[in-house]
Amino acid sequence: MITITLHKVVGDFAENKDVARDIREKEILPALEKGDEVVVDFEGITGATQSFVHALISEAIRRYGGDALDRISFKNCNETVQKIITIVTEYMQESG
């Protein structure tokens, strides 16, 4: 299992899609390819944009379907971030 602590990379507000893409390409997808579980830690983050979360996880859902959601977990999310993650994951499952 790997844990990705976002705050040290994105600061208090997760909005930069390029940073999300880098995390996805360098950490999330390689871990999933190896069969590992991924924990995305939102500790210290007050908010995130829908585009950030989409850039972070959509390709994993596209490639691995529901299995990606079984192996990616999110912790220390406030209510706002939880809602955004839910919106993105539901959208990806419907469009998949």
Image: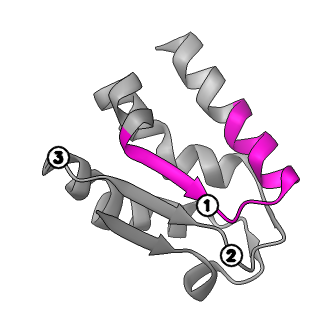
Question: What's the residue type where badge 1 is placed?
Answer: Lys
Label 2 belongs to which residue? 43
Q: State if disc 3 and disc 2 touch (CB < 8 Å).
A: no
Left or right: 40 as drawn, with respect to 85? left
| Mark 2 vs 1: CB contact within 8 A | yes
Figure check: 45 above or below 20 = below
Distance from disc 2 to disc 1, alpha carbons, whole Å, reads: 7 Å
Mark number displayed over residue 75 = 1
Q: Real-space Cα distance between discs 1 and 3? A: 20 Å
Instruction: Name the element at disc 2.
Output: loop
Rendering coords of residue 73 (x, y %): 50, 50
Question: Mark on residue 50?
Answer: none
Marks 2 and 1, the one that precedes in the sequence? 2
Vertical arrangement, residue 66 with respect to residue 45, above or below: above
In the rendered view, tell whether residue 70 sits above or below residue 13: above
Query: What colour scheme does the image use?
Result: one colour
In the image: residue 49, left or right of residue 55: right
